[in-house]
């Protein structure tokens, strides 16, 4: 959710949303739903942190030129036609 959207919600709106959630899902399902939401947020943060770490690691590492094998070079004998 956007932080500005949450800032616009007052206490009355939050209470109405909580009541609607309780009516739709029931009191027994709400903790399970919140646990699932929390797990999802945690996984998302971990994945985004992993991506940021990978990007930072690739920026920090100097680019190494590819290593050429002796077979990659053209030999003098193959130039004769």
Image (cartoon, rainbow, N blue to C red):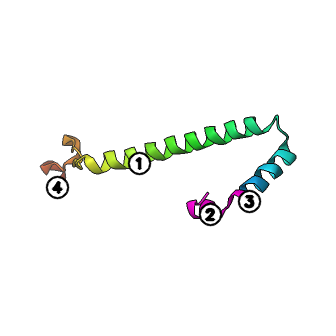
Residue placed at 81% from the left, 50% from the top?
19
- Residue 17 belongs to the span the image colors magenta: no
Q: Earlier in the sequence, mark 4 or mark 3?
A: 3
* Separation of residues labelled 4 and 3 (CA atoms): 81 Å
According to the image, label 1 marks what residue? 52
SS at circle 3? helix
Q: Is 69 located above or below residue 1 in the figure?
A: above
Q: Earlier in the sequence, mark 4 or mark 1?
A: 1
Q: Earlier in the sequence, mark 3 or mark 2?
A: 2
* Picture coordinates of residue 47, whole percent (x, y): 51, 43
Q: Residues within 10 Å of mark 3 (few under 14, many from 20)?
A: few
According to the image, label 2 marks what residue? 5
- Between label 4 and label 3, give the one nearer the viewer: 3
Identify the magenta region: 1-11
Residue placed at 68% from the left, 36% from the top?
35
- Between label 1 and label 3, give the one nearer the viewer: 3
* Picture coordinates of residue 20, whole percent (x, y): 82, 52
Give the left or right position of residue 63, taking residue 58 as reference. left
SS at circle 2? helix
* Picture coordinates of residue 59, whole percent (x, y): 29, 51
For the residues labelled 4 and 1, say whether their Cβ atoms are less than 8 Å apart.
no
SS at circle 4? helix
């Amino acid at each position: 959710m956007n932080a500005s959207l949450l800032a616009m919600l007052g206490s009355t709106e939050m209470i109405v949303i909580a009541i609607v959630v309780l009516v739709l899902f029931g009191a027994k399902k709400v903790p399970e739903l919140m646990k699932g939401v929390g797990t999802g947020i945690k996984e998302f943060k971990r994945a985004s942190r992993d991506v940021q770490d990978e990007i930072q690691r690739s920026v920090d590492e100097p680019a190494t030129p590819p290593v050429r094998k002796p077979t990659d070079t053209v030999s003098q004998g193959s130039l004769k036609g």
